[in-house]
Amino acid sequence: MPVLHLCLATLALASPGLADSGSGLGVARRRAEAGRRRHSGLKYVVPKLGQTVFDVTDLGAKGDNKTLDTDAIQESLWACGNSSDGGVVRLPAPGVYLSDYLRADNLEHCSLQVEAGATLFAHFAGRWDGDAFLTFLNTQHFSIQGGGVINANGWHWWPQTKNRPHTLHIGKANTVALHDVTFLDGAAHMLELYANNTEVSNVDIKINWGWWYGNKVDGLATSVTGDVAPNTDGIDVHGTPFYIHDCHIDVGDDNIAIHESDVLIEDCIFGGEGVGVHGHGVSIGSVGSGCFHQNITVRNSRFLNTHVGPNIKINSDASEGYVRNVLYENLIIEGTQKENLRLNTGRDSSSASLWNAKSGFIVDNITYRNITVTNTTDHYVTFVCTKAIPCTNIHLEDVIMDADSHRDVQCSYASGTMRNVSPKLCLDTSSSLTTMI
């Protein structure tokens, strides 16, 4: 599936200009702490679901962690798809349901319900390459819920560099809700969601760092490069509008990768305690030519021991498109392993010709407001933009970091405003971008 595609904005639900800003760093901490207190239920998207129950045990599923239950689960999904009014595909608790990959197309008004105390577990012995563990295409009014666990058994795939399957792929879909469910140990990207009008609520997406570091089996718990859980993005957003809230995402790559407009992320925790990668931040991109991303808000959330916090990645050869009207607000960033704030328009190139060539790509109106940064060990801020793709109207308001501005920040071709920022950053607050900052 392509990662970069044309993303024309149609709504303005998360416009930074309309956001409630509050004031003061106390607000930042109070609102970010709210990410620890979960909102119960869905707030924005409520699919219309059928009432008929398709219990997988009625078709022979055992849930005994020994029997392969693929056929019973697959037939239950097909039965829901063929029903006139949809329904609920139920994996009852207690039970561990072993399955090879599952796919169902054209589901309408259906829900996959993994009950609390039940686990849907990817069966490695029937190993497949490339396909997602769960694939749902041409799906309308669909949900995954129930309080249970979907375990992708990813450590078996991590040593190979190609064809590691995603955990969940939803494509050509509309009105989708994922809530009250846990996704564990993806082989690659966890949730690839090409779905418009989507809400992800009260979902945990995690790598079990402690278990894998402590139980390596013949070196299989790491990739060929020595990484644990490589390329395990938490959520890849490919739909609009898109809402994510009250989630905990602790993975080996981007916690969230945004590839669309009109995205609202709030009241989440990214990363975790102890040894582990814990994620590469909430990223916009990577972004190339032909992508138009706007009206993106990340607020009231906490980053804990991630590699990066807020992260915007623009390919150096991007020649058409924009990233604009982005708001990061009321954030606590603790213990990042690399940058706290990263904005880079020279990604994937050291070529001077690409850095200096004229480009029509625009990066404009990026706001960082009410942000507290503590206990970090590497570069605190990198706003590395290029002469070809400068970054304009970057606004920092009430941003407090325990950093040495001369040692721990890096800026180029980045201009805007600062108010109550400590330490003072290298952002160009004049009107000129004719020289390197």
Image (cartoon, helix red, strand yellow):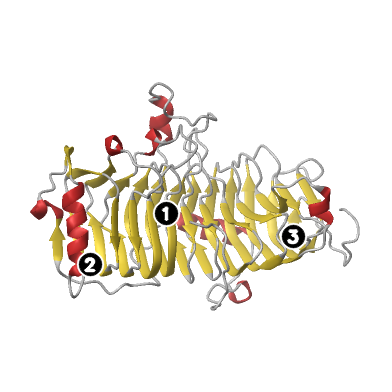
Q: Is residue 415 left or right of residue 190?
A: right
The crowd level at tag 1 (other Cα within 10 Å; few <14, some 14-19, many 20+) is: many
Q: Which residue is mark 3?
A: 420
In the displayed structure image, the side of residue 1 where residue 101 appears, left or right = left
Instruction: Find residue 202 and report its horizontal and vertical position in percent.
Output: 37, 58
Q: How many callouts does the rendering have?
A: 3
Labelled pair 3, 2 in contact (Cβ < 8 Å): no
Marks 1/3: CA distance? 38 Å
Residue at image mark 1: 191
- Identified by mark 1, the residue type is Leu
Q: Give the vertical position of 109 relative to 122 (above or below).
A: below
Toward which corner of the image does residue 385 lie, by quadrant?
bottom right
User: Could you say where residue 223 lies in the image, as x and y percent from the top left?
Assistant: 49, 31
Q: Earlier in the sequence, mark 1 or mark 3?
A: 1
Q: Earlier in the sequence, mark 1 or mark 2?
A: 2
- What is the spatial separation of the Cα atoms under label 3 and label 2, in whole angstroms? 56 Å
- The alpha-carbon separation of the residues under discs 1 and 2 comes to 22 Å
Residue at screen point 11% across, 51% down: 57
On the image, the x and y values in percent for residue 309 come to: 60, 50
Residue type at tag 2: Gly
Q: Residue at x 47, y 30 (%)?
A: 222
Q: Which corner quadrant of the image does residue 123 belong to? A: top left
Residue indicated by mark 2: 81
